[in-house]
Amino acid sequence: MPLQEQALIRRIRQRGTRGGAVVKGIGDDCAVLRVPPRQELLVTTDLMIENIHFKLAWHTPESVGQRCLTRGLSDIAAMGGEPLACFVSLALRKDVPQPWVDGFFRGLLLWSAKFNTPLAGGDTAESLSGVYADIVVVGAVPRGKAILRSGARPGDGIYVTGSLGGSAAAITALAAGRAKSLARHGFQPIPRVAIGAWLRKKGIASAMIDVSDGLSTDLGHICDESGVGAEIEVSAIPRARVSGRVVPLEMALHGGEDYELLFTSRKQVPSTIAGIHVTRIGEITLRKGMRLCGAGGRLCELPVRGWEHFRK
Amino acid sequence: MPLQEQALIRRIRQRGTRGGAVVKGIGDDCAVLRVPPRQELLVTTDLMIENIHFKLAWHTPESVGQRCLTRGLSDIAAMGGEPLACFVSLALRKDVPQPWVDGFFRGLLLWSAKFNTPLAGGDTAESLSGVYADIVVVGAVPRGKAILRSGARPGDGIYVTGSLGGSAAAITALAAGRAKSLARHGFQPIPRVAIGAWLRKKGIASAMIDVSDGLSTDLGHICDESGVGAEIEVSAIPRARVSGRVVPLEMALHGGEDYELLFTSRKQVPSTIAGIHVTRIGEITLRKGMRLCGAGGRLCELPVRGWEHFRK
């Protein structure tokens, strides 16, 4: 292991937080965690790659570190779980300056403290080009209570937290040169951990997913796994406001990285959970496929379309 | 998510194995695992990067997949744990041919079946250059029984499984053009999971680590974490034989990626565990620092020296 990496590990180790579920953190062959009794374990891994998921020119290192952990925490939230610890594997090209690495960990550890998810380990390596970060979040949920994508049934209402399309709109503004950096823009998605856990405790959600790839893609996953279809009311979709303007419908339908929760329920759902607005946007149908219901009740197919945030 | 990735996820999902600890594998926001009662959880993550840890020209895709899992399983072994499940995050450049990806998973899943470690999830992304694989292995160990690096005490014997330097010698032969590929060479390290678990059950090892970065580096970690020193008998070090020749001492001392277990003990240690030879190579000392004891009892300092397998 090159000395540069050893220094990085020392720094991470100094910053790694202990306590909670972490019996032994950074500094051995494995981390040792204690899982609360009668709980099942949740594990998620997410890659973030320079110039695919972020750009050094657009994103502050703090926001990359935060967003990295947001991706993992959001997956734990989408199962109704609570996070126990996180791990990050980081491959850095040689010319990434030290302040960038420090900023990355500052952002990651800010979120780690806020969401009570100690950094318990990881790996570091040199990359020959680009920055690669793989985040692992481990969480827990009472046995048999994880909210899967497969539980939606015809007649269930479809709900989404917060608003959609904000992340796509912010990136589009940057790409078009209308904004200088995401930091100034102030767009930082927040993982909906408290809402996910609340929905599980109350037994409200029949199926759940986080909106990481866009509403059409992620609703498609719920429909596929549950063997059902969906009808979405166009006018009901909560579109984000960015720089004072409501984002275009396309961004709310297909834009990714909003990290809101999308869930189905046949129960009474409050309009606000943990201070965040929750909106009913449609209904699960027996008939497969996804349809959009527009003005005057006209129906059209909702295509699954990913959003390519940016490519070199 | 690009369609190419979705196809990859479908393939992984079809190949992902279930059962054992895995309640819900690939296909939701998180995997759901069941941790046996009264056990603590072990988590390890390891990066493998093209042209840093492997070369497409030298390593078959199967051997990269196998070695990827070996790195994680070896960390679980070094804690005395037993693996529950694995996860792989894979970033692939566009020009990596499909048969390479198939071969990678064939190798990984061969080891996954052999070591009873189902592939329960992961992530995929496009990389702009190079292949990046981050392997996560989750394991379990009875509460409070994980074998740490910090338990070595003066007077403990120092032991190593198998032989050392084989991986460094194989790579050196390839780099010098004396061998054509590692596949022909037949060098494939095997994670010592059964030995690690046996040592823990019998309460024999006071400290343990796997030899991934080389004997000098990894023994250094045990000494640092335990606050002790070590004396190694040069003649006792079990050097690997490669192509009929005993490897040079330097490779046995500093060569990495052998994935043997290095442990300390004050108890009676059998000379063979789970069919693998175990050798006493020295003793833990109160005096800090590591020393090599050569012919005629002469002592010299053992420097910590990493082995740079290859660089572009």
Image: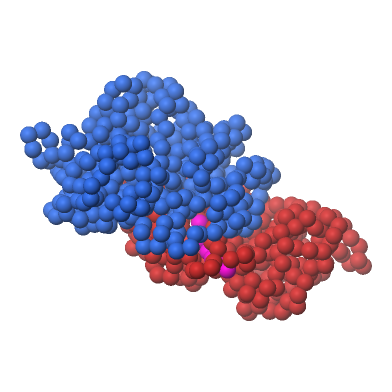
Chain colours: A red, B blue
Does residue A118 appear in the picture of this structure?
no
Q: Looking at this view, is B135 or A52 the one in front?
A: B135
* Lateral position of residue B268 relative to residue A24, left or right: left
> Residue at the spot x=41%, y=52% of the render?
B81
Residue B51 % position (x, y)? 44, 35
* Lateral position of residue A49 relative to residue B260, left or right: right
Range of magenta residues: A136-142
Q: Quadrant of the C terminus of chain B?
A: top left
Residue B6 % position (x, y)? 67, 46
Q: Locate residue B291: give its quadrant.
A: top left
Q: Looking at this view, is A295 or B278 the one in front?
A: B278
**Number of numbered discs overlaid on the protein picture:** 0
What kind of secondary structure does the magenta stretch mostly adopt?
Answer: strand
Q: Is residue B99 above or below residue A52?
A: above
> Residue at the spot x=48%, y=63% of the render?
B37
Residue A139 covered by magenta stretch: yes
Residue A97 % position (x, y)? 40, 53
> Residue at the spot x=42%, y=57% of the render?
B141
> Residue at the spot x=54%, y=61% of the render?
A41
Residue A167 covered by magenta stretch: no
* Lateral position of residue A287 relative to residue B35, left or right: right
Does residue A267 appear in the picture of this structure?
yes
Q: Looking at this view, is A36 or A157 the one in front?
A: A36
Residue B183 % position (x, y)? 46, 26
